[in-house]
Image: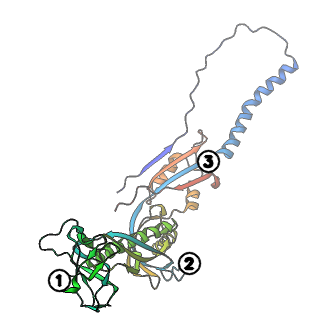
Amino acid sequence: MVKKVFDISPPKKLEKKKVERFIPEKKPEFKISPPRSRMGKKLILIPLVLVIVGVIAYFSLSRAEIEICPETEIKIFETRLTVDKNITNIDFSAGSIPGVVFEETKTFPQEFPSSGEKSTEKRAEGVIRIFNDYQNDQILVAQTRFQAPLEKFKPSLEEDEEPWFKTVERVVVPAKGYIDVRVVADAPGEKYNIEPSTFSVPGLAGTPQYTLVYGKSSEAMSGGSEKDVFEVTQEDLEGAEKVLIEKATEETKNTLKGKVPEEFVTLEEGFKTEILEAFSLTEAGTELEKFTFQVKARTKTLFFKEEDLENFSKEFIATEIATDKNFDQETLKIEYSPEAIDLEGGEIMLSLKLKAKIYSVVDETSLRQALAGKSLTETQFFLQNQPEVIRAEVKLWPFWVQRVPENFDKIKITIAVDPSPISE
């Protein structure tokens, strides 16, 4: 049984002033003039005026403020609600509120390091002009060797390395003429990038043509190298795609949230991201230290107004409680979670759990009629016997008033529901 508390502020008592008795000496005789007699009459009228003013003040200024705290109970209501992009107003009968579709499309290019490594070997190559001072044409088969002076190689060649450059294809050098041909070093390495030189043909040694057929280069050989290089792997490409898809999904969602007005509600589960592009112009196996990957994403969601959710919830509770009951909208607590999401169709099904404090309706008109003209004691007794009231406070003005006014308009009744929040 809830203990009832009633706070009634009684009027303040007036302190009685101590009056000392004064016995005058023998009264002198004197003549009363007419003006003095009129002043005496005025003094007699003062108390009467004060009484009249007091009566008028009582009826014109007196008022009562009665605050009632009704007995409440917490009730839970459960229902389903559809957020629908195809409607513009709340449909209470269908259990639907309007939704709005928002979407964001962004492109995310990013550079990634290559993780693969491999050793590369490249042979120097260049063009030499072959001279034939012999009287007959000279046929040179493919892979014919041309030898440069050893001092041209820097650093010096090792014992197992040959100072040769070979022709790529078969050529015929006309007698007393020349021809330009492309040659490639016998081995890889930077040491074969030699400066312009004169070349002999070792294969003609011991023949008359040995000194008459030779080659000369006007430009340095180039391209020879031996080094470790980075390589783009298939795993690099797949990892870059995964990272960018996660980044695109998160960033487009956050960008979308930032563009939605504050009055709309967001659902974390209500976002859908579609990857429109995911590619790199670099293929696996390419010798690069870094490569670029790009993802284009589109995220969409269906939002709804918090005001629509609250209005639907209030209307739903109002239809679920008895007609002699009311609920405190300030204590309304709404919990919701998505049951089904169809962004293509523009619908989200929500499961609602509503909590609110319910109390009996107070008939303020009947209460005013019952309390009008009652003393403080009678008012207290009456309110104590109202089963739906657990606390009441009565305030009367001015301070000397001891009864509730007869005039209904001067009786103000306030319903104050316990403000403590509803626990989880």
**Tag 1–tag 2 contact (CB < 8 Å):** no
Which residue is most to the left?
159
Q: Residues within 10 Å of mark 2 (few under 14, many from 20)?
A: few
How far apart, in angstroms, are the residues tagged by discs 3 and 1? Answer: 136 Å
**Tag 1 residue:** 205
Q: Nearer the viewer, residue 287 or 372?
A: 287
Whether residue 285 appears in this view of the structure is: yes
**Tag 2 residue:** 89
Q: Tell me the element at label 2.
A: loop
Q: Is residue 267 above or below residue 45?
A: below
Q: Is residue 166 left or right of residue 345?
A: left
Mark 1 vs mark 2: in front: 1
Whether residue 144 appears in this view of the structure is: no
x then y, percent, for residue 123: 25, 77
Which callout, 2 or 3, points at the residue further toward the start of the chain? 3
User: Which numbered marker is on residue 63?
Assistant: 3
How far apart, in angstroms, are the residues tagged by discs 2 and 3? Answer: 45 Å
Q: Nearer the viewer, residue 377 or 150?
A: 150
Q: Residues within 10 Å of mark 3 (few under 14, many from 20)?
A: many
Q: Tell me the element at label 3.
A: strand
x then y, percent, for residue 293: 37, 75
Q: Tell me the element at label 1.
A: loop
Mark 3 vs mark 1: in front: 1
Choose top left, top right, bottom left or bottom right for residue 136: bottom left
